[in-house]
Amino acid sequence: MRMERKTLGLYLHIPFCAQKCAYCDFYSYALGDDGIKKNYVSAMMLQMEDISGACREHVIDTVYFGGGTPSLLPLSQVERLLYSIRHNFKLSKGAEITFEANPGTVNLKYLKGLRKLGINRLSLGMQSANNAELKVLGRIHSVEDFGQTYKDARAAGFNNISVDVMYGLPGQSEASFRRTLEYVAELEPEHISLYCLKIEEGTPFFAMRDTLSLPDDDTEYEMYSNAVEFLSKQGYERYEMSNFARGGNMSRHNLKYWNCEEYIGIGASAHSYFCGERYSVVRNAETYINGLEVLEANIPIISESRMIDMAESMNEYVMLRMRLDEGVNGSEFRARYGVDFWKKFGVYLDEYIPDGFVKKNGENYSFTTKGMFVSNYILSAVLDFSPQDLDIG
Ligand code: SF4
């Protein structure tokens, strides 16, 4: 009898950027010393080797190179990482392998190289089709650069492309955001991610927050709801709060996060959820490299870890599944936890139905568009912990 293997996602964090954007609080830094890339990749390979024994029963069916800017890695280093993945794990034949690339860091030759190495999904950080907005954000590319990169990606043979777009930007009008959406829709990527700018502590935007001319909450909501409507007319189905796909091209890797499935994170600051435990790696590339390369130094690379008990798991499941358009199904919840969803959470979600924030269809609970926009607030009231407490990816 053939043993059924469990599936697993693999996330690889590349923390290098050409320059730091004014709003970004991801772990990444502007790269001065090029030499660190090779050492960093070697450390990632060691981490994969270390974890591989625990993953023998698993098959990797999604791989995601995120950052930072993975496209700052030379192809030779990407090749080493892919070799290490194939060498240390069982990679499924049809695995989705996503690579984040920023316009201004790649050309046709590089993109062809990625395809040749087996990368089959590209995620491009466009953010805006307005050069003034890109400049304010601190992005290194222009709209024209993005257009060229997109064209090159298609010419290189990528038939699964995702484009990141942002709204709620300083000085951005609803008309300007609409033009960005029209520009993207005309290109017909398979997937669009739509993010609202958040002013995060410790970023240059945070220091400037009183002088930035930001759209108010009502305008941001208008932008979001109009975008959902516009993209739906263009054939993009919203399947998660911020993610839209056409032709069923949803991000299989990111769906693992929202479905509470297992994944392993490789690299500085990467998070994992594996065998009932959530843990994260140190947020410092040098400590990470030394921890893996200089064994006698005895530097721990795991900064935080905790086992998730059933109560916490139920809260996480509801929080993450409610991000999806399909929401939470009572029968599925009972099959997973042996607990009545309505008694535990549904009764509280019911309170948001009359005002149109939550909808119920049989045993299924999900957010409406306006509910999604304030979901953190609603979930904080319904769940036993704050949605902001959970880091994924
Ligand atoms: S390119 Fe991406 S990861 Fe790098 S600084 Fe800008 S937003 Fe952050």
Image (spheres, rainbow, N blue to C red):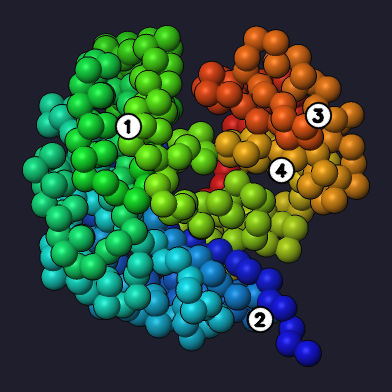
User: Which badge, 3 or 1, is on the more N-terminal residue?
Assistant: 1
Ranked by sequence position, the earlier of labels 2 and 4 is 2
Q: Which mark is drawn over residue 345?
A: 3
Determine whether label 2 and label 4 are within 8 Å by CB: no
Residue indicated by mark 2: 56
For badge 4, the amino acid type reads: Tyr
| Measured Cα–Cα span from mark 2 to mark 4 | 26 Å
Residue 166, numbered label:
1
Please, what is the three-letter code of the amino acid marked with disc 3?
Phe
Which mark lies nearer to you, 1 or 2? 1
Tell me the number on the disc at residue 224: none
Q: Position of residue 129 (x, y in %)?
A: 18, 34
Helix, strand or loop at label 2? It is: loop
Q: Specify the farthest residue to the bottom.
A: 1
Crowding at dot 4, Cα within 10 Å, few <14 / some 14-19 / many 20+, comes out as some
Note whether residue 378 is visible.
Answer: yes
Disc 4 versus disc 3: distance between alpha carbons? 11 Å
Q: How many marks?
A: 4
Which numbered marker is on residue 317?
Answer: 4
Q: Residue at x 72, y 30 (%)?
A: 361
Disc 1 is placed on an element classified as: strand
Nearer the N terminus, badge 4 or badge 3?
4
Crowding around mark 3 (Cα neighbors within 10 Å: few <14, some 14 to 19, many 20+) is some
Q: In this picture, is 219 found above or below 385?
A: above
Going from N to C along the chain, the mark reached first, 4 or 1, is 1
| Relative image position of residue 331 (x, y in whole percent) | 82, 44
Q: Is residue 68 visible?
A: no
